[in-house]
Amino acid sequence: MKGKFITVEGIDGAGKTTQLAWLAEILQRHGITYIVTREPGGTVLGEQLRQLLLDKTVLMHAETEALLMFAARREHLDKVILPVLANGQWIISDRFTDASFAYQGGGRELENSKLVTLEQWVQGDLQPDLTLYFDVPVELAQQRVKQVKHADRFEQEQFDFFQRVREAYLERANLYPQRICRIDGGLSLEAVKIAVEQALQPLLKHV
Ligand code: TYD
């Protein structure tokens, strides 16, 4: 049986890292074998691309940024995601293509059609089975990010950039309500945990 593909999304500071640990714990409780990975990254080449992409001293054109994100993704699919799914295991990815539509499309204002072309090229019709999108107001996310001492190339962006990223995420959540589950990341930790568990129910039913 094919495994399930779950992705986790949100603007920087939305708290997805904390929730990812909770998600993993739920799968463990259900006896599901899973792998946690991330984008950009997840492979040797992808992690090197990540270093370049997050380095604030490395300047690049917005299209170069998008192409590198998708190059890392191509490698990630080939070396990790597809083999793991074929093996019947589940895979949780900390970000995937929705992040490209949100950050490069929304944040950097790249044309959607170019991203759709890259998406089609790199992944064909493959989409996650479930995407958990942690939604928080930009003000709250920025307060959290400020506590991180060394902001990376994305984290150092300004309010308006993240506002566009958030709007693009919300737009996608509206477009794909079957796949993307919007979770209010501003709720208490306990309430968010319950929401995550609920979102997983349709996938867990078949385990
Ligand atoms: P992030 O996932 O936030 O990692 P950490 O929690 O360690 O900071 O960092 C990855 C950054 O890459 C994040 O700011 C969003 C950005 N990103 C894109 O701009 N486009 C993409 O397609 C992906 C996958 C990530």
Image (spheres, rainbow, N blue to C red):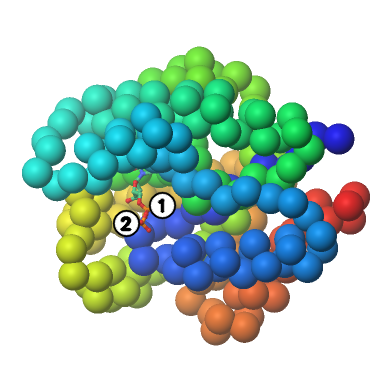
Q: Secondary structure at mark 2?
A: helix
Determine the image quadrant of residue 183.
Answer: bottom right
Give the labeled residue for mark 2.
163
Point out the residue furthest to the right here: 206
Under mark 2, the amino acid is Gln
Which residue is painted at 33% across and 24% down in the image? 67
How far, Cα to Cα, is label 2 from label 1? Answer: 6 Å
Q: Are marks 2 and 1 in contact (CB under 8 Å)?
A: yes
Outermost residue on the front side: it is: 44
> Residue 108 placed where, x, y %?
26, 39
Residue in the image at 14% along x and 47% along y: 56
Q: Is residue 171 visible?
A: no
Residue topped by disc 1: 167
Q: Is residue 86 visible?
A: yes
In the image shown, does 80 or 126 lie closer to the viewer? 80
State the mark number for residue 141: none
Element under disc 1: helix
Image x and y of residue 65, in percent: 27, 31
Q: Position of residue 130 (x, y in %)?
A: 67, 48
Instruction: In this rendered view, identify the residue nearer to me: 44 or 200.
Output: 44
Quadrant location of residue 156? Answer: bottom left
38 left or right of 21? left
Q: Position of residue 55 (x, y in %)?
A: 18, 45
